[in-house]
Image (spheres, grey):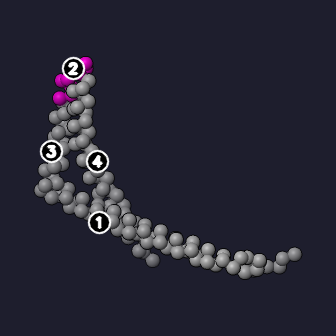
Amino acid sequence: MIDRFDPSEDLPENVDAGNQAAVDRLQQEEAETEDQLLTASALGAEALDFANSALGREMIRRAKQEVQDLALELLQVPAHEADRIREIQTHAGAAAMFMVMLNDITTTGDQAYKTLLANSQP
């Protein structure tokens, strides 16, 4: 019958080293995660600054206009002109992807910033 468990009994001597290695890995992962959050937060802020700059606003305006123009052009293309339809879709997709990526970077950055703030609270 065992009265109480003593973890030092009947365990190999290298268990403490293994535990320390696991703790070290967790600490390294936490540091890497914090670095990733800091990077994402900084990129998000930079993307937001870009989007609010004169150049960013102009590029966003042009991308939106390109998508609208290509959508109207697509309506005029006969259905049998598959190559032209694909070409228009590709151009429209590229313009739309620019806006999607910019939005994704700013949103991810905002979430990373909020996570960093939450993690810094006691």
Task: Report which residue position mark 2 lands on.
Answer: 78
Marks 3 and 1, how far apart at CA: 26 Å
Residue at the spot 25% in from the left edge and 48% down from the top edge: 99
Amino acid bearing label 4: Val
Q: Quadrant of the N terminus?
A: bottom right
Amino acid bearing label 3: Arg
Residue at the spot 18% in from the left edge and 48% down from the top edge: 60
- Which mark sits nearer the N-terminus, 3 or 2? 3
Dot 4 alpha-carbon crowd within 10 angstroms: few under 14, some 14 to 19, many 20 or more = few
Task: Report which residue position mark 1 lands on.
Answer: 42
Amino acid bearing label 2: Pro
Task: Report which residue position mark 3 lands on.
Answer: 62
Marks 2 and 1, how far apart at CA: 47 Å
Q: Which residues are magenta?
A: 73-81
Marks 2 and 4, how far apart at CA: 29 Å
Residue at the spot 77% in from the left edge and 77% down from the top edge: 10
85 lies above or below 122: above
Q: Which of the 4 quarters of the picture holds residue 81?
A: top left
Task: Report which residue position mark 4 lands on.
Answer: 100
Q: Secondary structure at mark 2?
A: loop
